[in-house]
Image (cartoon, helix red, strand yellow):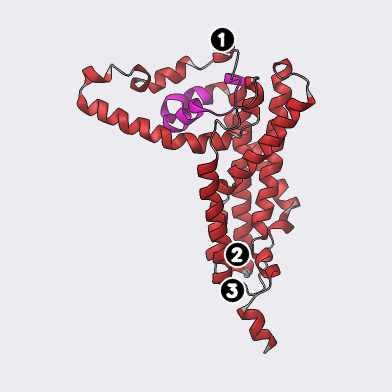
């Protein structure tokens, strides 16, 4: 009778066990975000005054944006942990599947971190609308990137680092589940969905811009967040561009920025020589 009660009403520890990989991903995400911000702060040099209040703002507000961004980034793993049947989830093959999922997500986060360092070196700012253009108009820029940086070597090194970190922290990816139910897991996911909606409406990219120093403001943000918020705006720009193009080439000339995104990006190839602020 006691066993039946436990199966019907699993303890909170069963849910914590099921979502343990989510906590692992959160720890990795926050650690990487902290390292990225610290490196960029050091790289900014005298552009950021050596003021403890500025540092507190950068890392305090930055942590808030990192947590908000993690709510969005974690959705693929949340869905997997939610929908995977209990028996299949506890199987040995799924343990290796979970390792692969964790490794893939970690590799992606590390790759984005290195990309943001490169982006800062070029534009003296974190990811912004230019980075969104890079994602949308990849054909125009990928050749220049491959010629300028040893992408293959970097990807190999990032992969090795991701494998080492995943192996060292593999206990965080252990697949344990003391009979959690889909209904209980659904409550967790519903809470995650509510948190996602609330943060989407309550925050935006401008909310962090409270400092008089532009570098402090941009360092307090999160590059992934800027991309996620910028993609819908870029989609609107693309729809407007298609409407303009459909109206005729003469009208199309009225929007030079939208006309030749590739040329725009090529002109921005070395902006650090003339860009003073993010």
Quick check: 56 above or below 199? above
Image quadrant of residue 42? top right
- Inspect the magenta stretch and tell me whether residue 261 lies in it: no
The secondary element bearing badge 3 is classed as helix
Residue contact between numbered discs 2 and 1, judged by CB atoms under 8 Å: no
Distance between the Cα atoms at labels 3 and 2? 10 Å
- Residue at x 63%, y 50% (from the top left corner): 103
Q: Where does label 2 land, which residue? A: 94
Residue 175 visible somewhere in the drawing: no
- Residue at x 70%, y 48% (from the top left corner): 27
Q: Residue 263, how many percent across, how many down?
A: 40, 18
Q: Earlier in the sequence, mark 3 or mark 1?
A: 3
Disc number placed over residue 274 in the picture, else none: 1
Of marks 3 and 1, the one in the foreground: 1
Q: Earlier in the sequence, mark 3 or mark 2?
A: 3
Q: Residue 49, how many percent across, how many down?
A: 74, 18
Residue contact between numbered discs 3 and 1, judged by CB atoms under 8 Å: no
- Residue at x 60%, y 68% (from the top left corner): 89
Distance between the Cα atoms at labels 2 and 1? 52 Å
Q: Residue 259, how many percent across, how many down?
A: 33, 21
Q: Earlier in the sequence, mark 2 or mark 1?
A: 2
- Badge 1, how many Cα within 10 Å: few under 14, some, many 20+? few
Residue 19 visible somewhere in the drawing: yes
- Residue at x 60%, y 16% (from the top left corner): 277
Name the main secondary structure of what is drawn in magenta.
Answer: helix
Of marks 2 and 1, the one in the foreground: 1
**Image: magenta residue range:** 121-145
Q: Where does label 3 land, which residue? A: 87
As drawn, the residue found furthest toward the top would be 274
């Amino acid at each position: 009778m006691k066993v039946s009660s436990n199966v019907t009403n699993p303890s909170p520890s069963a849910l914590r066990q099921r979502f343990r990989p989510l906590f692992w991903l959160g720890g990795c995400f926050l650690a990487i975000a902290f390292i990225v911000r610290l490196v960029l702060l050091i790289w900014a040099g005298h552009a950021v005054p050596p003021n403890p209040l500025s540092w507190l703002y950068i890392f305090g507000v930055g942590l808030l944006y990192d947590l908000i961004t993690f709510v969005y980034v974690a959705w693929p793993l949340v869905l997997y942990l939610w929908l995977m049947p209990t028996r299949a989830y506890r199987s040995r093959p799924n343990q290796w599947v979970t390792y692969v999922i964790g490794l893939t997500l970690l590799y992606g986060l590390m790759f984005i971190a290195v990309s943001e360092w490169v982006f800062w070196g070029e534009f003296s700012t974190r990811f912004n609308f230019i980075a969104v253009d890079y994602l949308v108009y990849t054909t125009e820029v990928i050749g220049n990137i491959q010629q300028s940086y040893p992408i293959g070597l970097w990807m190999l090194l990032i992969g090795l680092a991701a494998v080492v970190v995943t192996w060292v922290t593999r206990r965080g990816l252990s697949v344990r589940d003391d009979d959690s139910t889909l209904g209980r897991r659904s409550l967790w996911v519903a809470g995650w969905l509510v948190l996602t909606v609330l943060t989407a409406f309550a925050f935006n990219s401008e909310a962090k811009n409270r400092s008089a120093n532009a570098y402090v403001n941009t360092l307090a943000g999160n590059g992934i967040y800027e991309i996620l918020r910028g993609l819908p705006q870029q989609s609107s720009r693309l729809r407007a561009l298609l409407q303009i193009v459909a109206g005729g080439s003469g009208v199309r000339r009225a929007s030079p920025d939208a006309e030749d995104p590739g040329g725009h990006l090529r002109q921005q190839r070395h902006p650090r020589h003339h860009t003073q602020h993010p």
